[in-house]
Amino acid sequence: MSEGLATRGEFDAVVIRTDYTDERAWRALAATLPPHVHVVDDPSWSGATVDRVLTATRDAEDLSVVFLADTTTTHSRPPALLAVTTLTREDCEDAEDHARLTESGPTFRTTPAGVPDIHANLSLGNLGFEEYAAWAGESPDGVYRSA
């Protein structure tokens, strides 16, 4: 399953397609993805759960978040990708640091426009996953929208 990640550019965000039920909706979503997004569009990822994705991306370097185009993404208007932190307890300084990172949960939803903002700031350490998750949680529909 990790074959689609091997060609990712060092600074590219990763969007993994896990829903293959609506090709038209997928094409419309894909057209809205910003530049420097590595799209993994391989049916072997169909139906992949968050746990399966985390297992498959565990060895990917410099990847602290992945974005899933799942069934909810495909059927929501506007489309909202699932942002998933790839950081585990072992990646954090201590259990308290990991608890803070995931205090709003290990996932949240974002519009495609939010992908580069989230990916860049997490990669640089400017902001934490928990901050984006909290902002998404403050939105009436639970979706982070880039300013």
Image: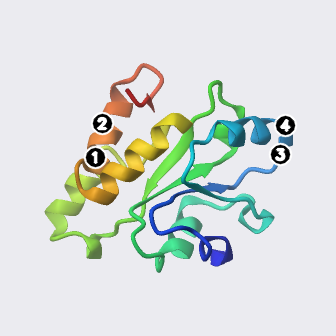
Residue at image x 33%, y 40%?
Answer: 132
Name the residue that disc number 4 marks. Answer: 24
The answer to the question of whether label 1 and label 4 lie on touching residues, with beta carbons closer than 8 A, is no
Mark 4 secondary-structure assignment: helix
Amino acid type for the residue under numbered disc 4: Arg
- Camera-near label (2 vs 4) is 4
The local crowd at label 3, few if under 14, some if 14 to 19, many if 20 or more residues have their Cα within 10 Å, is some
Give the distance between the C-alpha atoms of the residues marked 2 and 1, in whole angstroms.
Answer: 6 Å
First reached walking from the N terminus: tag 3 or tag 2: 3
Q: Position of residue 56 (x, y in %)?
A: 56, 74
Name the residue that disc number 2 marks. Answer: 134
Give the distance between the C-alpha atoms of the residues marked 1 and 3, in whole angstroms.
Answer: 31 Å
Q: Quadrant of the C terminus?
A: top left
Name the residue that disc number 1 marks. Answer: 130
Q: Identify the colour scheme used.
A: rainbow
Residue placed most toward the observer, 89 or 69: 69
The answer to the question of whether label 2 and label 1 lie on touching residues, with beta carbons closer than 8 A, is yes
Residue 46 sits above or below residue 108 on the image:
below
